[in-house]
Amino acid sequence: LPARQRPSAIRHSTRIAAEAIRCGCSHLHSHFGGGAAVHAISAARLAGISCSFTVHSGKFERNFAHASLIEPMVGEADFCVAPTSQLKDNLERAGARDTKLIPCGADLERFVNDGRQGGINERLLFLGRLIDCKGADTLLEAIGMLQDAKRPGLDIVGAGPELEALQRKAKETGLDVRFLGPK
């Protein structure tokens, strides 16, 4: 870590380790890379237990506070979790000891259109915090690549620092996007 971040990381990791020991925790998992994973890895090593973290973003580097942290973090974790095979491959190339593929999403067999609702809605729904690594910008780009006749509308539920940029992008590209705020 950069020198200015080390005291904070040590302080937080020490507190997490103490709590993990107090609770009899045998494994720490950070559901995000970046600072959360740095703390989980450091605390796990202080507590003498195993650790792991999940990467989320389609753009692998977005999962880490700095590119120089990728290999040390991936190499230090007992295992890493990836929701896509592409992220799994990236983790393995970065030196992961063990990588678990746990896809996010829905079982599409449970959501088959049975015709009772008169056909397809022709709108997509995005639920999530509007931050860089969630990929709402990528979703807008993908919708924009479709032919006008096949382009679905999009409802975005959520808030966050990327809201204004997403609104601008939707307006500039003429996409049918409704920003519904947090729900």
Image (cartoon, grey):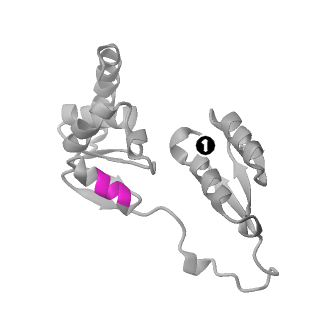
Q: Residue at x 32, y 57 (%)?
A: 88
The magenta span reads 86-90
For the image shown, how many numbered marks are present on the structure? 1
Q: What residue type is labelled 1?
A: Arg
Residue 87 lies left or right of residue 164; in this view the side is left
Q: Does the magenta stretch include residue 136?
A: no
Residue under the point 41% across and 43% down: 32
- Residue 63 appearing in the image: yes
Provide residue 81's location: percent of width, then percent of height.
34, 54
SS under mark 1? loop
Please indicate, yes or no, whether residue 21 appears anywhere in the rendered image. Answer: no
Placement of 167 over or under 86, stated as above or below? above
| Residue in the picture at 41% in, 46% down | 31
Residue at the image position 28 percent from the left and 25 percent from the top: 14
* Quadrant of the snapshot with the N terminus: top left
Estimate the x, y position of residue 50 in percent, counting from the top left. Answer: 22, 45
Tell me residue 103's x, y (percent): 43, 63
Residue 129 placement, left or right of 44: right
- Magenta-colored segment: predominant secondary structure: helix
- Image quarter for residue 126? bottom right
Image location (x, y in percent) of residue 35: 38, 31
